[in-house]
Amino acid sequence: MLRLEYLILVRKEVGYFPVLVSHEERFRGKNMQVAKACKAMNDIGIPKETVKPVLKDLLDLYDKNWKLIEDENYRVLIDAIFDHEDPKRKERKTQEFLLQDEAKECEPPLKRSRMRSQTDHFSDSSGVSIPGSGTSPLRMQYQDAQVSQTCYKQKVAEFTHLCCEDNQTEPKTVSPPEHCRGTVKKPSSPKSRSLQGQTKPSQLFSDDLSKKKNLFSDDMRAECYSLSPETCLKDNGNDPVPLQVFQRGRRLNYETSKCIVSYKEPKVMHCGDLASKENVFDKYHNDDIGIRSEPFDDDLPQFEVPLAIIPPASPTLLCEDGPSNGNCSNFKGNGLELLEFKHLNMEDKGDRDSSQFDIASSSKGEVKISLICNYSQRSDFHVPSLDAILKRVEERYLKLYRISEPGFSLVKLMKDLCEFFLEEGTNSTDDGRARSINVTPSLDVSKQSNALDLLAVRADHQGNFYIPPSISNGSVKFQNLIETSYGGRDKNTKALEGLGSSNSSSMVVVQKHRSSIDPRKPPQYVDDITRAIPCACASETGGEFAYTPGGLVEEKFLENFISISCDPQQHHLFYCKDCPLERSKDKRSSGPCKGHSVRKFIKECWYKCGCSKKCGNRVVQRGITVNLQVFMTPEGKGWGLRTLEDLPKGAFVCEYVGEIVTNMELFERNMRISGNEKHTYPVLLDADWGSEGVLKDEKALCLDATFYGNVARFINHRCFDANLVEIPVEVETPDHHYYHLAYFTRRKVDAFEELTWDYGIDFNDSSHPVKAFQCRCGSKFCRDGKCPMRSRSGSQIFS
Ligand SMILES: C[S@@+](CC[C@H](N)C(=O)[O-])C[C@H]1O[C@@H](n2cnc3c(N)ncnc32)[C@H](O)[C@@H]1O
């Protein structure tokens, strides 16, 4: 049975972090898991002060709520784990394991010791505070066995104690001091440290399990502790020598460090060597967090993904059929009051394998997501690497679901899941109201508690966030966009509720995103130094970047684009000799070209610029960041698009996504669907007139959103005073042929205002093959003389 388990800790006061557990990883020491948790939290920008209480929770959770794997599976799993590894390493591990087995045999009623890399640690109320951690809540206690003198000698003979003092290079092999032998009392000094390699920290079981196995009585627990520095003396037998646990590659930062005890470590390490070693744990190895007394595996993988690891519950932790059938006592007994349990069996088509997906949550805010893949009947199975699994899932998402955002990762997906949980949980706790499902993909900052502000910080630090295929800038099938509406307590949500239930019954499409233009939260790229040095991309906009540090189009550029859009005649127009646009109207006799404006555009940075994704000159390529809604317009224009939040002037809304077709292709498409009223108006994407001033058919490119598109296809037309302006933005192509047609706000737009764009239709052009709709824009400048919505007081200034 392979278990990939996610434990998601949701703590209102500190935020959350996901914890990934694999079968393999459950054997790692607790401190490593804590270190990884620290790393995960540190990586997402949670300050150290807030990490500490989480760690306490983590340890409590570990100790009290999650059982360890049963002992008898241990050997089998070692084989499984190391089967695919270096044979030498496997041999070494096996030797260690056997050694411990032998030691166990001569230990009276003791638990079997684990090998060093698989030591687990437990704390209880009598645990020993970690030195240097002050009032650190972290507690460590090795519940060591009482060791008989004879057996101890045997064991000790197999251990190599390597000691060095100060800067001496000569290591000394020390005999185990008299004080270290036999039963060791609880160390009294707070500076005590565990001694690795003595009686091994035993594999511990929950109370139930230990009783069942008659392995460890409570009395014994009270009496048996690991060796501490105070109990170990120098070989002169008198002076206490502080002892430290040595972990290869891990820096020891105690100034007083004088002695290193290594367990079966053939290599002699000098203290100075140790101090110079750097690894991923270094930054967590500090006084505040105080993770230092536990022996670590020498061969710990250096994960790049910030995954923290928690030992999973025993299989019995999860109720078989949910809470209702009364099988959940284990869950409750472990301190987790089960709130909800969902179980999904995913039978494979072949009858050999099956997998299941469980989610359980508790009132404490812990959620356990468990993916269990049954491979018991497969002889060819080996435990795969976690990285490989993550990679494969990510690839599948990227390929199948077209998640094209560079920042996408499975871990982020899990974080999103966590966010949803917290969001849903917070809301239901707050108002107790039933909420409709919200399947929006990312965090809505406006709805989050302080705790989630941390998450926002994290997202900013990381500089990227997950955007699902349905809302990325790629061409996608629109059906994927349909989401359910939501209720809530914030201003926007209230307003949404105020819009009536018609929304929910009328297929409201909500795209919720973390807004990048929230003035309270500066955009993630303001500090990017690349902004200070405009690259070649800025030359298109006169040597300056077109965007403000807040990600808005600079006022002067915006005005220029608005002016071009409103009155192209005033700007430089190019007249082609044989206009394909005219030709597409009437193949036999194309009229004279009416002129095409030579388009100015914004050039965004791309991969060749050498800047990071956080560069301020990358706005459109990040995709939609504002909350948009497709709604049914009351004026009879059909569906429309509106914003759910206030937008400042110059804000990027979305780009127009569609298939890139030539003007002629579009014409032919329109002809094919003649009879249907819906026609696509050519949105000229590019026009390369060439040196002779001839616009070739294949160069007159248009966007057709009939079959593939994004929310922009719902933007209705408004004559002249629309609130959006389209700006060509070049993102990745250096040859100036392909633009992204991006919509930016022309002015400040209030939440729930419809977003409109001037299609540039000449309503009086009877020669156009596409019959214009009857305009209902309601603008006082409406160009359609028949517009029923046109304000009577307004004058039609253009014909
Ligand atoms: C790009 S679609 C916009 C979304 C469309 N309303 C829908 O329901 O799919 C363009 C079509 O919307 C309608 N439309 C857009 N603006 C309009 C307006 N100002 N007055 C009337 N109909 C409009 C027309 O039918 C037009 O062909």
Image (cartoon, rainbow, N blue to C red):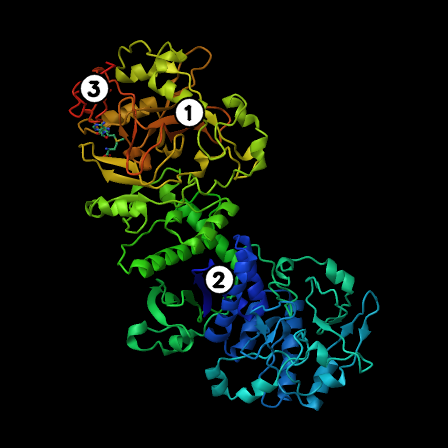
Residue 421: percent from left, percent from top: 38, 58
Seen at 34% across and 74% down, the residue is 320
Tag 2 residue: 19
Residue 537: percent from left, percent from top: 53, 27
Tag 1 residue: 558
Front: mark 1 or 2: 1
Res. 381 in view: yes
Could you tell whether 45 is left or right of 165 in the image?
left
Q: Secondary structure at mark 3?
A: loop
Query: Which is more N-terminal, label 1 or label 3?
Result: 1
How dense is the environment of label 1, judged by Cα within 10 Å: few (below 14), some, or many (20 and up)? many
Position above or below: 346 against 522: below
Seen at 32% across and 28% down, the residue is 723
Residue 483: percent from left, percent from top: 29, 47
The amino acid type found where label 1 is placed reads: Leu
Q: Quadrant of ligand 1?
A: top left
How dense is the environment of label 2, judged by Cα within 10 Å: few (below 14), some, or many (20 and up)? many
The amino acid type found where label 2 is placed reads: Val
> Observer-nearest residue: 698 or 58?
58
Could you tell whether 334 is left or right of 274 in the image?
left
Q: Secondary structure at mark 1?
A: helix
Q: Secondary structure at mark 2?
A: strand
Could you tell whether 450 is left or right of 430 in the image?
right
Tag 3 residue: 794
The amino acid type found where label 3 is placed reads: Gly
Residue 355: percent from left, percent from top: 39, 65
The picture quadrant where one finds residue 534 is: top right
Mark 3 near mark 1, Cβ–Cβ under 8 Å? Answer: no
Position above or below: 214 against 448: below
